[in-house]
Amino acid sequence: MRVPVVQNILSANDQIAQENRKLFDSRHILVLNVMASPGAGKTSFIERTIETLRDRLRIGVIEGDLASTIDTERIARLDIPAVQINTGGACHLDANMIRTALPRLPLDRLDLLFVENVGNLVCPTEFALGERLKLVIASTPEGHDKPYKYPGMFSAADVLALNKIDLLPLLDFDLDNFRRGVAALNPDTALFPVSCKTGEGVQAWADWLLARQAER
Amino acid sequence: MRVPVVQNILSANDQIAQENRKLFDSRHILVLNVMASPGAGKTSFIERTIETLRDRLRIGVIEGDLASTIDTERIARLDIPAVQINTGGACHLDANMIRTALPRLPLDRLDLLFVENVGNLVCPTEFALGERLKLVIASTPEGHDKPYKYPGMFSAADVLALNKIDLLPLLDFDLDNFRRGVAALNPDTALFPVSCKTGEGVQAWADWLLARQAER
């Protein structure tokens, strides 16, 4: 007698993430899951990217926060479609939150979708959302030791930005040490040093992203 | 017939936290649970406090990180008893981790114990460790909107520090806005603006802490 064996069942979150991803792929939307510490500059980075690429790509944003609509108001001021998810107490977004937010976005008219996760260097990596790329943003005031202390996040990154490089002259930030920490975990990740304040480095990042979107 | 009803059972974590607290109280050790975003300057703040108070109080430190012993090495360089807890993947310390670390500290010869939690503005508030005070450290590069976005953490704080005030002239940080956000959640919390780089504000904090320790 053969008993039925069901294998490779996805978790509920992974199941929904896979459905989200199929939906995004079918519409050729490049989706980025943007993760960072609180205050690393996720929203500023998205704003700078929008400024730089808005004539080339149609961009949408999902903002995740425990509370408040501060970030979505910032994005909406740029006349970009944006939806706020408030997680209540949850320390990360999940795939079902994204699915629930999608009807509020004009998916037929998007090339690029930023999903700004809750500010947290630990929990968000464990929940796939359906994204194609995990973008991790570090910032210089946090210190160069973050890859060593939060290896899960820096291992998960498909691409990294290091924000607030305008502050480098004032900080004891060892860029080589930071790069070594990243390379030990994730040797092939592109790293873009940027300043969302001055705009330095943003063009190189935008060019890279534009090339990724063209692959969709 | 009366059925037995057992009420007010503590969770396993709260049970152990209560036992930790009794132990600390019996030895008149003031214990602080230090919480902040990654890179807000928790270790630097503890180092500055040690420098300022080491002639008045006997101080110990427990360092919590997902990985690495970087912070404990920093504290140990000051000839202060320190223990590193590596949580593996966990985004917060818990009471049993603290209990497990205690035999590595000279509790008979401590007046003050800092427990530096994992850098995270969400998860650590949900796990009591047995501390008397929850110290939350914000930092100016993170932005003035953090109380609005992480209300749980700022509500839980017994005392707050705002670090990196030496960078204020370079940042768009609205201190009044930050104070209003804190006051709305937690009107009675003391807030100490400090710079661990220059030492500004550290003495006022140390005086406050010394007074709290004297109450033990």
Image (cartoon, coloured by chain):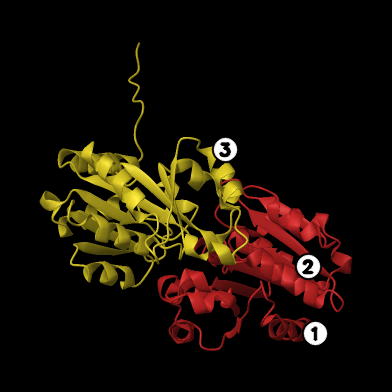
Chain colours: A red, B yellow
Choose between B117 and B49: the one closer to the eye: B49
* Residue in the picture at 30% in, 50% down: B206
Q: CA distance from mark 1 to mark 2?
A: 17 Å
Q: Secondary structure at mark 2?
A: helix
**Residue B31 shows which numbered tag?**
none
Subunit that carries the residue with mark 2:
A
- Looking at the rendered structure, the kind of residue marked 2 is Leu
Q: Secondary structure at mark 1?
A: helix
In the rendered view, tell whether residue A94 sits above or below residue B12. Answer: below
- Looking at the rendered structure, the kind of residue marked 1 is Ala
On the rendered structure, is B143 left or right of A52?
left
Q: Are marks 1 and 2 in contact (CB under 8 Å)?
A: no
Choose between B15 and B34: the one closer to the eye: B34
Q: Are marks 2 and 3 in contact (CB under 8 Å)?
A: no
On the rendered structure, is A106 left or right of A8?
right
Q: CA distance from mark 2 to mark 3?
A: 42 Å
Q: Position of residue A121 (x, y in %)?
A: 51, 65
Q: What quarter of the picture does the C terminus of chain A occupy?
A: bottom right
- Looking at the rendered structure, the kind of residue marked 3 is Ala
**Residue A23 shows which numbered tag?**
2
Subunit that carries the residue with mark 1:
A
**Residue B184 shows which numbered tag?**
3
Q: CA distance from mark 1 to mark 3?
A: 47 Å
The verdict on a common chain for dots 2 and 3 is no
Choose between A196 and B36: the one closer to the eye: A196
Q: Are marks 1 and 3 in contact (CB under 8 Å)?
A: no
> Which dot, 1 or 3, sits closer to the camera?
3
The verdict on a common chain for dots 1 and 2 is yes
On the rendered structure, is B14 left or right of B175?
left
Q: Which residue is mark 1?
A: A214
Q: Position of residue B96 (x, y in %)?
A: 28, 51
